[in-house]
Image: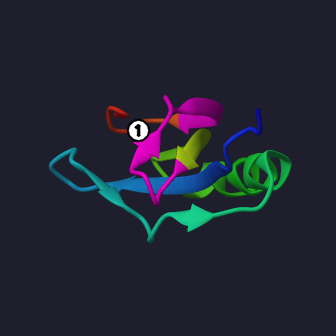
Amino acid sequence: MTSKPKLIVLAAFNETDEGELVSAFDAKQFDSEERATREAKKIAAEHAGVVAWSREADPDLGDYGPPNILFQSGKIPEME
């Protein structure tokens, strides 16, 4: 049985004056969990929240596994 490809993503959030979290930039996709984690740690101090996560994914079938948090800092929205 072959393993499904992984979707590896880094997202960052800023906080508005009203306390609402908004995306700091479009989520970035990475080829490796290590690279996503390294980049997340590098930018963590610049944003209200940063998260790097991965999940098994088969976009062609719309099949996505549960997210696996690789690195989290600060405030992030609820993950689905």
Q: Nearer the viewer, residue 28 or 6?
A: 6
- Relative vertical location of residue 25 with respect to residue 74 in this rendering, above or below: below
User: Can residue 48 be seen in the rendering of this structure?
Assistant: yes
Q: Secondary structure at mark 1?
A: loop
Q: Which residues lie in the magenta part?
A: 58-73
Q: Nearer the viewer, residue 15 or 35?
A: 35
What residue lies at 49% left-to-right and 28% top-to-bottom?
66
The residue positioned farthest toward the front in the image shown: 1
What residue lies at 50% left-to-right and 35% top-to-bottom?
74
63 on left or right of 35 = left
54 on left or right of 59 = right
What residue lies at 43% left-to-right and 52% top-to-bottom?
61
37 on left or right of 72 = right
User: Can residue 52 be seen in the rendering of this structure?
Assistant: no
Q: Position of residue 75 (x, y in %)?
A: 42, 36
Q: Position of residue 65 (x, y in %)?
A: 50, 33
Quadrant where the image shows the N terminus: top right
| Crowd rating for badge 1 (residues with CA inside 10 Å; few <14, some 14–19, many 20+) | some
Colour setup of the view? rainbow
Q: Nearer the viewer, residue 9 or 50?
A: 9
Residue type, label 1: Ile
Magenta region includes residue 59: yes
The residue positioned farthest toward the bottom in the image shown: 26
What residue lies at 42% left-to-right and 54% top-to-bottom?
13
- Relative vertical location of residue 64 with respect to residue 44 in this rendering, above or below: above
The residue under label 1 is 76
Q: Position of residue 29 (x, y in %)?
A: 62, 64
Count of labels in the image: 1
37 on left or right of 52 = right
Magenta region includes residue 76: no
- Relative vertical location of residue 39 with respect to residue 80 in this rendering, above or below: below
Quadrant where the image shows the C terminus: top left
